Amino acid sequence: MRQKKLLVFIGTFFNIGKFPIAQGTLASLITMLIFYFVNILLHTSCFTQIIAIIIIFFLGIPASSAGEKYFKKKDPGEVVIDEVAGQMIALLFIPLTLAYYFAGFFLFRIFDIFKPFPIGLIDKKMHGGLGIMLDDVLAGLYALACLHIIIYLI
């Protein structure tokens, strides 16, 4: 029972997902700010950032599954650990400026909300924790690619 509560706590990103409105956006915004300040204060390497994303992804799968059981619905809005992983991916390898980080935040939210192909397909066809995590990972990769194209063109 304790393990299930811990997984739900992780899945809701320390209860941020229980906020009454815009849980995913709030979790993404908080993730972006944490990622920014941790990178400034600790000068984390890309390798460290990737390891953190992998850990969150693999922890997010059982946490998201536990959240589905706990909230008794498919891909509950309260489960936002997927937004955390996707948002972190969207911010990889970019210059450490708030402007770029906010651009990564907005691009990730756009891809996460509108779910272009194949994100929407994964969201509909894959079930459980893996499906919950994968669509946001793809949204993060789309945002990452777009942001790097924008940076290159500027």
Image (cartoon, rainbow, N blue to C red):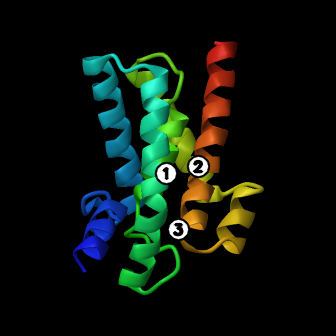
CA–CA distance in space, label 2 to label 3: 12 Å
Between 79 and 115, the one nearer to me in the picture:
79
Check disc 3 and report its element: helix, strand or loop: helix
Mark 2 or 3: in front is 3
> Residue 104 versus residue 44: which sits nearer the camera?
44
Give the amino acid at mark 1.
Answer: Phe
Q: Secondary structure at mark 2?
A: helix
Q: CA distance from mark 1 to mark 3?
A: 10 Å
Q: In 3D space, how far apart are the residues under numbered discs 2 and 1 (Cα atoms)? A: 8 Å
10 Å crowding of disc 3: few (<14), some (14-19), many (20+): many
Of mark 2 and mark 1, the one earlier in the sequence is: 1
Q: Are marks 1 and 3 in contact (CB under 8 Å)?
A: no
Is 96 rendered above or below residue 31? above
Q: Is residue 105 visible?
A: no
Tag on residue 137? 2
Q: Is the residue 59 above or below the residue 101 in the image?
A: below
Badge 2 or badge 3: first in the primary sequence: 3
Indicate the secondary structure of the residue bearing disc 1: helix
Identity, as a three-letter code, of the amino acid under mark 2: Val
Three-letter code, disc 3:
Gly
Residue 129 tag number: 3
Marking on residue 57:
1
